[in-house]
Amino acid sequence: MKHVIIGAGPAGVIAAETIRKVQPDSSVTIIGDESEPPYSRMAIPYYLIDHINEKGTYLRKTDSHFADAGIDVVRDRVSSIDTKNKKLSLEDGSSVDYDKLLI
């Protein structure tokens, strides 16, 4: 089973980690259009007033967290969704197939 999650915010990260626990043999991919690792939007004010550094905003603290968990992270924007053929088109021209899609 190939699960694809559009959105690399807290909800997308928790969804990916939960799917990984429940279906360890499934493929799990998060697609997010930001160049930074998934981060907490609620931590931004603390970053802006220098209470934490940029890494302190990241949802997971190690650079290899998602790779270690077997979760692929794609940094791109979805430009279209073909629900009939279960295929996402990305802005870079590539495509991603899925069995289950979470938006």
Image: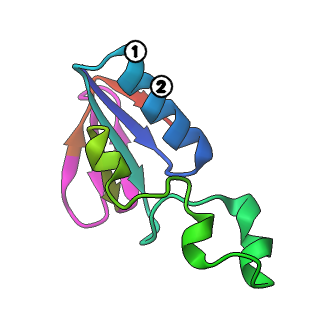
Secondary structure beneath disc 1? Answer: helix
Q: Are marks 2 and 1 in contact (CB under 8 Å)?
A: yes
Give the quarter of the image for residue 74: bottom left
The image position of residue 29, as x and y in percent, is: 32, 41
Residue pointed to by mark 2: 18
Considering the image in quadrants, where does the N terminus appear? top left
Secondary structure beneath disc 2? Answer: helix
Q: CA distance from mark 2 to mark 1?
A: 6 Å
The front one of 102 and 28 is: 28
The image position of residue 8, as x and y in percent, is: 49, 51
Q: What residue is at 36 percent from the left and 26 percent from the top?
A: 20
Verify whether residue 91 appears in magenta: yes
**Image-based side of 92 in relation to 60, left or right:** left
- Residue 97's place in the image compared with 42, above or below, is above
**Image-based side of 2 in relation to 49, left or right:** left
Q: Which residues fall within the magenta stretch?
A: 76-95
Question: Which three-letter amino acid code belongs to the residue tagged 1?
Answer: Val
Q: What residue is at 62 percent from the left and 78 percent from the top?
A: 53
Question: Which three-letter amino acid code belongs to the residue tagged 2?
Answer: Thr
**Image-based side of 78 in relation to 10, left or right:** left
The front one of 82 and 12 is: 12
Residue pointed to by mark 1: 22
Q: What residue is at 44 percent from the left and 32 percent from the top?
A: 17
Verify whether residue 30 appears in magenta: no
Residue 80 in view (yes/no): no
Q: Which mark is residue 56?
A: none
